[in-house]
């Protein structure tokens, strides 16, 4: 049974009754009830697959091939009615004007062939009837309203020319173009670092108050809910299992699933305290590591020479056996560039050694190091080949580093590596013959970890290994990484913007800003007594 919605304190803007959404006869939203008052901020919380996004898209009938039933009663002057049964022409007048949506990934939601300004202006021309010149001026004003620097220049930019935070602000400007009464925000900060996440959230809160609009925030980030929402509704398997004020639900959760979500914060393994100390020889060591990219110079100077952009400016660090070095910073700080250089995938200057050997410009000479140093990428869905089976993906390293291994022994090693990450034939029938798309995000990340473990590495570079995962799955993957470190003595170079992940995993921490290391030391010292103002800001935002 769906819990009764808490009584709103303002007139209802939207009342959803018995909403049911199914695909090919299978229900994914199972008769839920909730309401949003005018000017209210409601958070819809749950793991991937719980039905959050489908619920929001169904309100505007944007879900293809879905059977939708129930009622979504919208109350707006001159445009009231049931969103689920009104004619398409009437609903088209509400979309974008009275109800707007911010999508999760702006890079895929924005048209790559048109400038940001043109895309915002198009909405104003279609919905408000503005002339081309007036709509472009209004688009620039909207970009300025969202805090984008140099809005006139950014309006002439294409989506790929903007940073992640700028693209998200452009999406917000587009959604707010017609001053909607209700904003549907689908995971609007998932792909952003901690500082940008806070900025976008503050921006949404400020714009919500100024325009008096209601917001339906779809998220799995409980910190965002605490900071932003008035009320929260918790979804599990298509049901709303609990809803009420944020204060009451978080202080006194009634449902077991709600308690599970709240208790899913990453925790530190007590056994990590016994990791090797500073006297152990480093597994990877860098001194004055510098990475620069060539850039074109303006004017006639670019005919004769090129400039450079320095992404990493003289970084020095050491990673000891069995320990985790966490690198934290905003997008563009140089974290991922440093990781790629550490893997020998970027040209660099300075000194860098892994397992006592320097990276060579000759690929064959690096094969011994590549067996010692492996990488787990941020998005397992894009890093795992969709054309290969699990057996081929996990066994790939053996074909490179142990090509003469008999087929029977190779399969045994594949099965053992999968078992080490908690995946077996008993749990997943036909496991070795399956493909990546047949698994969830957390399961795919386990496959990515099994793929690197099979060659018995000593150092793993973890590039945002849990940022795309739900809080409960994130906790499971971090616990797996902690167990593997404890059992195998692995070292980790952990790249992340999540302070909670750093607290749970890191023994040592480096803080990067604009390519420079602004603070470094033991995790205890840096996290509990930060000296640098930038570090203090990151910790406060996290």
Image (cartoon, rainbow, N blue to C red):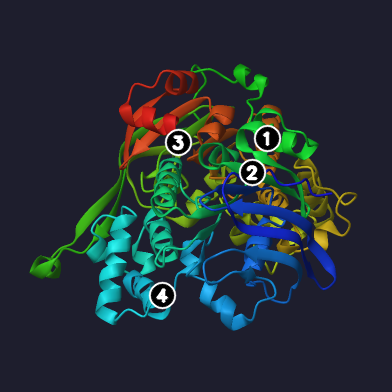
Residue that badge 2 annotates? 232
Percent across and percent down for residue 28 are 78, 61
Q: Earlier in the sequence, mark 4 or mark 3?
A: 4
Label 4 crowd (10 A; few <14 / some 14-19 / many >=20): many
**Which residue is located at x 26 percent, y 61 percent?**
151
Distance from disc 2 to disc 4, alpha carbons, whole Å, reads 31 Å
Q: Earlier in the sequence, mark 2 or mark 4?
A: 4
Residue that badge 4 annotates? 123
User: Closer to the camera, 284 or 403?
Assistant: 284
Q: Which dot marks residue 327?
A: 3
Question: Which residue ends up furthest to the left in the rendered image?
Answer: 300
Q: Please say if the residues under marks 1 and 3 sit with CB atoms less than 8 Å apart.
A: no
Label 1 crowd (10 A; few <14 / some 14-19 / many >=20): many
Distance from disc 3 to disc 2, alpha carbons, whole Å, reads 33 Å
Say what secondary structure mark 3 lies in: strand
Q: Please say if the residues under marks 4 and 1 sit with CB atoms less than 8 Å apart.
A: no
Distance from disc 4 to disc 3, alpha carbons, whole Å, reads 41 Å
């Amino acid at each position: 049974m769906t819990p009764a919605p808490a009584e709103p304190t303002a007139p209802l803007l939207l009342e959803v009754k018995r909403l049911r959404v199914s695909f090919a006869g299978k229900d994914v939203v199972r008769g839920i009830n909730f309401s949003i008052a005018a000017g209210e901020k409601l958070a819809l919380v749950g793991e991937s697959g719980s039905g959050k996004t489908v619920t929001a898209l169904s309100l505007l009938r944007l879900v293809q091939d879905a059977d939708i039933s129930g009622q979504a009663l919208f109350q707006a002057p001159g445009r009231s009615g049931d969103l689920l049964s009104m004619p398409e022409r009437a609903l088209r007048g509400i979309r974008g004007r009275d109800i707007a949506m911010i999508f999760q990934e702006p890079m895929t939601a924005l048209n790559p062939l048109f400038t940001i300004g043109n895309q915002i202006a198009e909405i104003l021309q279609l919905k408000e009837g503005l002339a081309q010149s007036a709509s472009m001026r209004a688009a620039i004003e909207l970009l300025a309203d969202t805090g984008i620097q140099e809005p006139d220049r950014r309006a002439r930019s294409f989506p790929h020319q903007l940073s992640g935070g700028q693209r998200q602000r452009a999406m917000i400007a587009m959604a707010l173009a017609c001053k909607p009464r209700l904003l549907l925000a689908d995971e609007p900060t998932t792909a952003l670092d901690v500082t940008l996440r806070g900025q976008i959230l503050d921006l949404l809160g400020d714009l919500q108050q100024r325009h008096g609009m209601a917001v339906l925030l779809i998220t799995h980030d409980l910190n965002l809910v605490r900071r932003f929402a008035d009320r929260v509704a918790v979804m599990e398997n298509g049901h709303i299992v609990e809803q009420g004020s944020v204060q009451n639900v978080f202080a006194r959760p009634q449902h077991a699933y709600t308690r599970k979500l709240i208790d899913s914060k990453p925790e530190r393994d007590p056994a990590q305290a016994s990791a090797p100390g500073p006297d152990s020889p480093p597994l990877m060591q860098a001194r004055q590591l510098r990475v620069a990219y060539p850039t074109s110079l303006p004017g006639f100077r670019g005919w004769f020479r090129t400039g450079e952009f320095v992404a990493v400016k003289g970084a020095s660090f050491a990673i000891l056996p069995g320990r985790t070095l966490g690198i934290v910073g905003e997008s563009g700080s140089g974290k991922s560039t440093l990781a790629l250089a550490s893997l020998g995938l970027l040209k660099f200057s300075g000194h860098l050694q892994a397992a006592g050997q320097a990276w060579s410009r000759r690929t064959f000479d690096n094969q011994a190091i590549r067996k010692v140093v492996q990488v787990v990428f941020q998005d397992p869905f894009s890093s795992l080949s969709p054309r290969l089976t699990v057996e081929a993906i996990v066994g790939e390293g053996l074909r490179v580093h142990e090509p003469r291994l008999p087929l029977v022994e190779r399969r045994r090693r594949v099965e053992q590596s999968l078992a080490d990450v908690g995946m077996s034939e008993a749990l997943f029938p036909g496991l070795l013959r399956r493909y990546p798309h047949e698994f969830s995000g957390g399961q795919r990340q386990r496959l990515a970890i099994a793929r690197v473990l099979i060659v018995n590495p000593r150092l793993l570079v973890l590039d945002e290994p849990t940022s795309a995962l739900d809080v409960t799955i994130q906790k499971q993957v971090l616990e797996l990484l902690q167990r593997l470190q404890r059992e195998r003595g692995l070292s980790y170079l952990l790249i992340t913007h999540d302070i909670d992940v750093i607290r749970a995993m890191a023994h040592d921490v480096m803080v990067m800003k604009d390519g420079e290391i602004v603070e470094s030391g033991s995790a205890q010292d840096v996290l509990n007594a930060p000296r640098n103002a930038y570090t203090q800001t990151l910790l406060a935002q996290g």
